[in-house]
Amino acid sequence: MPILAQAEDDERVRKVDSIFVYKPAQPIEIYNPNAKFISNSICADVIFSNSGFGGGLLYTHSLDEDNMLFANFYISGARNTDEIEYWDYNTGRWIVPNKINRLFMIPLTLGYTRLMFQDAIAGSFKPFITGGIGPTFIISTPYEKEWFTAWNYAKTYVRLDAYIGVGAYFSLIDNSVASANIRYYYIPFGGNGLESIRGLPIKDFGGLVLSVSVGYTF
């Protein structure tokens, strides 16, 4: 009996080693933030300028890790910076005194972007410089007409635009990407300019523009 009891005690304390091998369902990829920028991307643009807000699209094509080509456009209003609306009790609507035209602009730009400090800055923050050139479509509608009716009297002008800018890319989750940049546009109208406010023609439709872009790479 003592021998049997000792055997049972030995069985209870015996340690049995087990080996478990875990295999992932998909191959594990090492995160490399630089890889996101060796690709194409398409982004939605939100524009802030002296004329207010606008929206557009940005397409980029990477030539290599440092050099990119792009095409972008945006749509926004255009106006004198001192246009202030007042409530007109006679007409029962908001008006801008002495305003004669509603103006809209659509700059379409092709250009080049250079990523900077690739060897000095690690991670997903990628500063860049950029520049482009292309046509700008400027549309005017008469302010005295109702907003939708006025489009029957619209006039379209085409002018050359050019810009330079600085900004930075920020990679996000998966294949998403975001960027922010400041651009200076030069869009001369020529001649006597185009009036939004009577007697104050706009001769250059350019200026500083802040752009925030969010999209994905592919």
Image: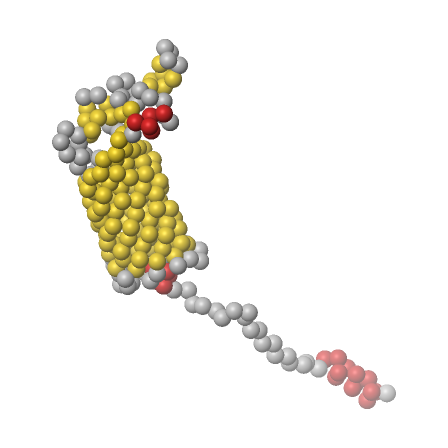
x%, y% of residue 174? 44, 58
The total number of labels drawn is 0
Rendering coords of residue 74 (x, y %): 31, 41
Q: Can residue 85 be seen in the rendering of this structure?
A: no
Please report the residue visible at 32 percent of the width from the left and 38 percent of the height from the top: 75
Q: Judge from the rendering whether residue 2 lies leftward or rightward of residue 21; answer left or right.
A: right
Q: Position of residue 211 (x, y in %)?
A: 31, 43
Quadrant containing the C terminus in the rendered view: bottom left
Reply above or below: 206 against 62: above
Residue in view at x 21 percent, y 21 percent: 198
Q: Quadrant of residue 88?
A: top left
Name of the residue lying farthest toward the bottom? 3
- Residue at coordinates 22% horizontally, 49% vertically from top-left? 132
Quadrant position of the N terminus in the picture: bottom right
Q: Is residue 42 above or below residue 136?
A: below
- Looking at the image, which is closer to me, 74 or 168? 74
Q: Nearer the viewer, residue 5 or 181?
A: 181
Quadrant of the rendered image containing residue 33: bottom left
| Extreme-left residue of the structure | 191
How far across and how far down the image is residue 85, in percent? 32, 21
26 on left or right of 1: left
